[in-house]
Image: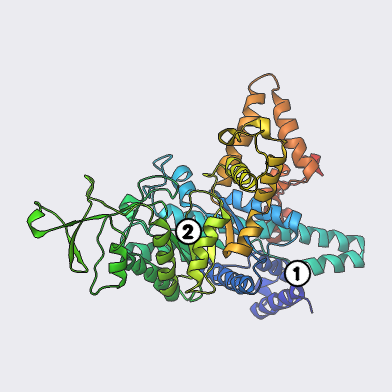
Amino acid sequence: MSQYQQEINRAQAEIDKAGAAWSAISAEAVARMRLQNQFQTGLEIAKYTAGIMRRDMAEYDADSSLYTQSLGCWHGFIGQQKLISIKKHLKSTNKRYLYLSGWMVAALRSDFGPLPDQSMHEKTSVSGLIEELYTFLRQADARELDLLFTALDAAREAGDKAKEAEILAQIDNHETHVVPIIADIDAGFGNAEATYLLAKQMIEAGACCIQIENQVSDEKQCGHQDGKVTVPHADFLAKINAVRYAFMELGIPDGVIVARTDSLGAGLTKQIAVTNEPGDLGDQYNSFLDCDEISADELGNGDVIIKRDGKLLRPKRLPSNLFQFRKGTGEDRCVLDCITSLQNGADMIWIETEKPHIGQIKGMIDRIREVIPNAKLVYNNSPSFNWTLNFRQQVFDAWKEAGKDVSAYERDKLMSVDYDNTDLANEADEKIRTFQRDASAQAGIFHHLITLPTYHTAALSTDNLAKGYFADLGMLAYVKGVQREEIRQGIATVKHQNMAGSDIGDNHKEYFAGEAALKASGKDNTMNQFH
C-alpha cells in the first residue's frame, strides 16, 4: 500500500471515530495537507537535516569526490528558488545545501539599514532568516505536491489508470526541498552565554549546522577585511561548548559545528592568554606575540610583560590597546586553531584565506591531518576574491616557471578583456571550473559555498533591467530580458500567483466550503495565459 493511501486510511479512521459531526471532512484532503506539511517544527527540520549532513560527511570520508555545495541566501524566496532550480535541472537535492551569511544579514536584513559585516545587526535577525528560509522551502514542497494532486485528479477524471499510477508513484517518492543550512553565528554576538542563547534560537528555527569564528565579538570584522582580532583558544572553545550544549539540550546531539579561524589574516589579539605551564595551549598562543626582550630596569609605567624560558618579554601594544602577532605566523596559528577546535568539539573547520589557491589550502590541511586524519574543511569560494585575475596569474606563474613563453602577457594587467579568449585565459577558466572538485580531492574540502552570490546576481540583473527600461527599450527590456526567458526556460515564477500559493489556497477553499468556494483560478485569471 502506498504512503499516500496509508495517510488517507489513517485520516479516515480518525474521521470515523469522531462520528457524524465530521462527515464533511475528506480523508483524502486531510492526507494531502499532511503530506504537504511534512515538518511541523524547526527542531524536526534540524534533526532531519543533521542526519543528512552526518551521512554526507561519512560518505566524503570514504570518497573525496562526494563533496557538498551551497549558495548563500538573504531571503526565503531566494533559497526556495535555488532548491526549485536544483530539483528542476539536477533532479535531486542530494549534497546541495543553503548557506546563511552573516555578511548578507548585516547588509540586507537589519532594521538599521545596510551595515558592514561587524556584528552590529540585530542578532535575532539571524534566527529569523533561518525560520523564513524553511518556511519558503516547506511552501515549495506544498506547491509541488499540490500540482501533483491536481494532476492526479485530472488523470482520475479522464479514467487514465496508467497516468494515475505514475502520479501516485511521484507522490510517494516526493523529495523534499528542505535541506541543511549552514548558519553563520559570527563570533557569537557576545560572551559564551550569549552564544548559547542565540544558538538555541537558531536550532529551534531549524539550523542543524552552526559556523562560529575565533574573532573578538565586539571587534568582529568581515573575514576579508583588515583589522581582525582573534581570541585565545580557551575563549573560543567555551563558545564551541556553548553551541554543543544548545544542540544537546534541544535533542539534536548530532548537530554540526564548524569552527572558523581568521588567524591567517588576523594580526592582532585583545588578550594575552592564561598559561599555567610551558607548552600549554595558552603558552602556545602567546608564543606568536611580537615581543621585545627587556630587563626589569626597563619596565615602564603600565607595561604588560610575560615570562618565557627565563626571559622577560614585553608584547608590542598598539595605541588601540591591542597586541600584535609576529608577521608570518598566520599559517602556524591557523593550523593550531584547527587542531585545537577539532580536538575540542568542532566537527569541521573553516580557514578564511585571502585568495583561492589549492596549494596554500593543501599545505595547511596536510599539517592538520597529521594530527586529525579525517579533518574536513568548509571553504568560502568568496566573491571577495578576483577569481579571474587570481587564476590567470596562477597560470602565468606556472607557465613562467615551466619555461613557457609568456611575453604576450602582462601579469598585472591579466584582468583585461583583451586576454579573454587567449590560451592563458582558457586554461585559467578551466582551473576555476574544476577548482571545487580539485580542492576537495587534494585539500580536504567537504563543503564549498559562495557567501554572497545573490547579492551580486540581484544587482546585476536589476542593472540590466533598469538601464533598458528607463532608456529607450521601455517594456521590451522586461519582456525580452525577463518574462520571455522565464517562459522559454520554464521558470516557475512566470506564474507568480501560483508561486505565491494562490492555487493551494483555492484547493483549501474547496476542501472547506465545497462547491460554494470562491476560487481565484477561474477562466478570467490572467495566469492562464502561461499554460
Q: Nearer the viewer, residue 500 or 397?
A: 397
Q: Are marks 1 and 2 in contact (CB under 8 Å)?
A: no
Q: State which tag comes first along the sequence, 1 or 2.
A: 1
Q: Where is residue 64 shown, x and y percent of the image?
A: 64, 68
Provide the residue designation for mark 2: 351
SS at badge 2:
strand
What residue sits 63% from the left and 25% below the top?
Answer: 467
Quarter of the image that includes the N terminus? bottom right
- The mark found on residue 416 in the picture is none
Q: Tell me if residue 510 can be seen.
A: no
Q: Nearer the viewer, residue 166 or 185?
A: 185
Residue 108 falls left or right of residue 503: left
**On the image, which quarter does residue 469 sit in?**
top right
Mark 1 or 2: in front is: 2
SS at badge 1:
loop
Circle 1: residue type: Asn
- The mark found on residue 173 in the picture is 1
